[in-house]
Every structure is written in C-alpha cells, then in structure tokens.
Image: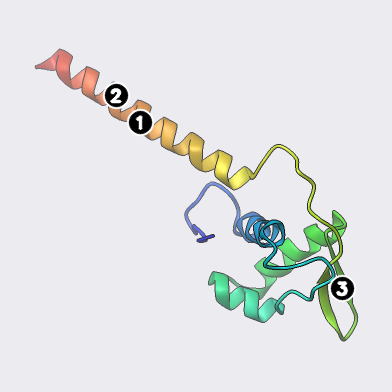
Amino acid sequence: MAIDPNGAVSLSAQVKGDIVERIRSGEYALGEKIPSLRSLAAQHGVAELTVHAAVKELQYEGVLESASGRGTFVRAAPATGGGDLASAVEGLRREVAELRDRVSAIEGGDSA
C-alpha cells in the first residue's frame, strides 16, 4: 500500500492499514516476527515514530505483541470490522471529485 503524505488519513493509520493487509494476505503469518520499526519506516518512507504509533495501536488491539529484545510478532488476526478506513476515505474522495466535475460541467453549460 502506497502511503499518501497528503491524504486525509494520518500516516500512522495508513501504515497500520498496510500492516493489517499484510497480515490478512499471509505475508506476515500468525506467530511470525514482523520487520523492525526502522525497516518498516524505510519501506513506507515515514519516520520511525509514525510506524511506532501504528504498531502500538495494533498491540493495543491484540494483533501484535512485542517481546523485549526479540521483536514484534503477529499475535492474532485483525478484526474484520467495517473495512479499511483508508480505502473508504479514498472512495469518498473519488466520489467528491466526480461530483465536483459534474457541478463544474453544469455550471459551465449554464453560462455559455
């Protein structure tokens, strides 16, 4: 998942969404160690603190678990809630852009 630095969704939420998708796809299997914060930050082009916030939230949700000196591991499958927030926001952004174009076309047609 590409991180959109200008997106409506925070960077940490986007990173969290990507980690969740990687767990769901099996890239990060149950019980497996995920990459380090530094590695994830480099992959996503964000600060380590941003990745740390995403990982902390997933730990709070029970999806990830850290073992001191060993790393962070996938503890459980993510809950299947209302879908991926980043995807929902992106869908809404596309709809708004389409509506903006339609309104502009209508307004442009009236003034001609």
User: Residue furthest toward the top?
Assistant: 110
Q: Position of residue 50 (x, y in %)?
A: 66, 66
Please give the residue where the numbered disc 1 appears in the rendered image. Answer: 98
User: Residue furthest toward the left?
Assistant: 112
Please give the label number shown on residue 66: 3
Q: Amino acid at mark 1?
A: Glu
Residue at position x 16%, y 13% in the image: 110
**On the image, which quarter does residue 38 sit in?**
bottom right
Q: Label 2 to label 1, Cα distance in Å?
A: 6 Å
Please give the label number shown on residue 102: 2
Q: Secondary structure at mark 3?
A: strand
Q: Position of residue 37 (x, y in %)?
A: 70, 76
In the rendered structure, the answer to whether residue 104 lies left or right of residue 47 reads: left
In the image, residue 33 sits, relative to residue 16, either above or below, namely: below
Residue at position x 22%, y 23% in the image: 105
Q: Secondary structure at mark 2?
A: helix
The residue lying toward the viewer, choosing from 95 and 107, is: 95
**On the image, which quarter does residue 41 sit in?**
bottom right
Quadrant containing the N terminus in the rendered view: bottom right
Quadrant containing the C terminus in the rendered view: top left
Q: Label 1 to label 3, Cα distance in Å?
A: 44 Å
Instruction: Check if mark 2's residue and mark 1's residue have beta carbons within 8 Å.
Output: yes
Q: Position of residue 10 (x, y in %)?
A: 60, 53
Q: How many marks?
A: 3
Please give the label number shown on residue 83: none
Q: Amino acid at mark 2?
A: Arg
Q: Amino acid at mark 3?
A: Ser
User: Residue furthest toward the bottom?
Assistant: 69
